[in-house]
Amino acid sequence: MSTLVTRGVARVCSLLPSRADLAMMGRAPKQDLLAGLTVAIVALPLALGFGVSSGLGAEAGLATAVVAGAIAALFGGSNLQVSGPTGAMTVVLVPIAAQHGSGGVLTVGLIAGVILLGLAVVRAGRYMAYIPASVVEGFTLGIALVIGLQQVPNALGVGKPEGDRVLTVTWRAAEAFVASPNWTAVALALSVAAVMLAGARWRPTVPFSIIAVIAATIVAQVFSLDAAAPIGDLPSGLPAPSLGFVDLSAFGSLLAPAVAVAALAALESLLSAQVADGMTMTVGQKHDPDKELFGQGLANIAAPLFGGVPATGAIARTAVNVRTGASSRLAALTHAVILGVIVFAAAPLVSRIPLAALAGVLIATAIRMVEVGSLLAMAKATRSDALVLVLTAVATVALDLVYAVIIGLAVAGALALRAVARQTRMDQVDFRPDVPGDHSEEEHALLAEHIVAYRIDGPLFFAGAHRFLLELSEVADVRVVILRMSRVTTIDATGALVLKDAVVKLARRGIVVMASGIRLGQHQVLDSVGALDLLRHEGREYATTPEAIAGARKYLEHAGLLGPHPTAKIP
């Protein structure tokens, strides 16, 4: 017991921030502080909006951005990740809030945090490495489209229409704009986006997003642009930490939603961190997936104590962080601290920022997220990669992140299985005498007439096994079939059953099947379905091909088709 405890403590200690992680925070503090300030400006309206959308109010979104953002920045596994409330999580939280109230949402977040800690301890984060690059690229493209579409109502200066699908909301916003155009909001949004995009190409190190937002705010105030709707009143201060929301009697009914929230938090955070790795130009800037799960777990345990909703790594804010030059976790920590200061001190000033200006910031961010070169390279790689990329992107926009990744993985897995199955080959091997001159031409013809040998290469599993059965069942009328199986890489239960069926079908036609070179690791699966018993019948399983040919010759001699003669073999 003490050994397990010691190992557990050691594992938890390995998930804590290292000295190297903390040392990086002092390498480029000015650059990280500016990036954190920029992210804070972008994160503020998102935190407010997602808090309202979740059903717990704007203060819940702010509490999440401040508390979860700071803890995930310190304890997470990515130097670039920015965490907080997200749109994908809001979709999951709305039905929980409707059924269990705000206390249910907070309890779900707490349970989800504990689950994330467990996933980190058992090293579940490493399995993210198995997500294909085409899925990640499609996810990134889809998220960029969603981010851009989500800004349409604010960019057009119309109220957010009802609906939980981004395409529906965008269409209704366009209809509202046509009915009552607001060109002031459009001009502000496009101006901010244009300044950011042009400035990034001219002076990448200058925080043009801050400059553009400040300029847009001044213009809106000086010229009294009523059509440029401001953010509005902000809550002042965070609530005191409390566990009063926990209702143990509802634990059973909240466990399933908590698992879903934890799964989404893990998936979105790790994908966001992976995308951030791909966006940064810093050599060796890679996240630790298990540490990231650990940090998100702590963040989701702490956020509900202050009235916050469940949090994840946020791709939009993380993208802004990377694009504005962040190099360490100091930027994400700064973003949380600045939001905390805003809550207590600067709410009246920030409340005047036009929503259209912030929409322009995110539109520019979405455009800069799309790496055209990477997309073209992926599309040109193979048709399968192109298909997976497109399907994942479309599903991200039309459905949601979880379904998109599931669809992308399912299609990628199916295409990969098809490709592997096509590698399985069964080639007929020309029969020839053991030693030239040992057989007369007449006897060689008799051997070739009665014995056919096949060499099987590759895996024999469910994806391609039935094709193998079809090919083997069409063997011409001979007396003996020799299967050379030394090059079979793997056999599953389906492959073993198909092999057994082939042996049975050939036996009904009076054809004897002999096998050679079956690997030791493949005996168990063949034996489990009874295929090995059939091959061992009368000693028809052989270690080598020459031995199998010798056995085939003895069988033909016993049948009276050949006279006694030296053994023949195939190469």
Image (cartoon, helix red, strand yellow):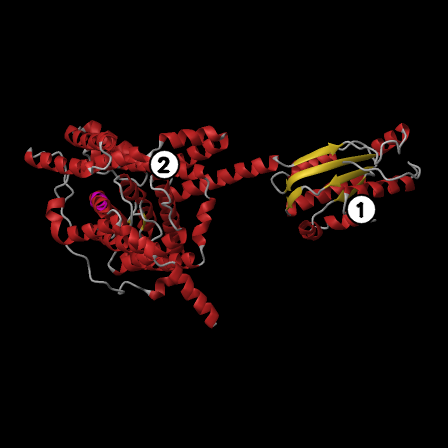
Q: Is residue 134 left or right of residue 301?
A: right
Query: Which class describes the residues within 10 Å of circle 1: few (<14), some (14-19), or many (20+)?
Result: many
Residue at the (43%, 30%) spot, across then down:
377
- Please provide the residue range marked out in magenta: 35-40
Query: Which class describes the residues within 10 Å of circle 2: few (<14), some (14-19), or many (20+)?
Result: many
Q: Is residue 549 left or right of residue 338?
A: right
Compare residues 339 and 329 and report the one nearer the observer: 329
Taking the view exactly as shown, the residue that stands out farthest to the bottom is 2
Residue identified by numbered label 1: 540
Residue identified by numbered label 2: 142
**Residue 290 pos. (x, y %):** 40, 54
**Residue 184 pos. (x, y %):** 14, 30
* Amino acid of disc 2: Gly
Residue 319 marker = none
Residue at the (26%, 54%) spot, across then down:
70
Q: Is residue 438 above or below residue 525?
A: above
At mark 2, the secondary structure is helix
Q: Is residue 43 left or right of residue 214?
A: right
- Answer with the quarter of the image where residue 449 lies: top right
Q: Is residue 218 left or right of residue 6?
A: left
Compare residues 36 and 236 and report the one nearer the observer: 36
Separation of marks 2 and 1 at Cα, in angstroms: 57 Å
Q: CB of mark 2 within 8 Å of CB of mark 1?
A: no
Magenta stretch encompasses residue 375: no
Residue at the (69%, 38%) spot, across then down:
456
**Residue 531 pos. (x, y %):** 73, 48
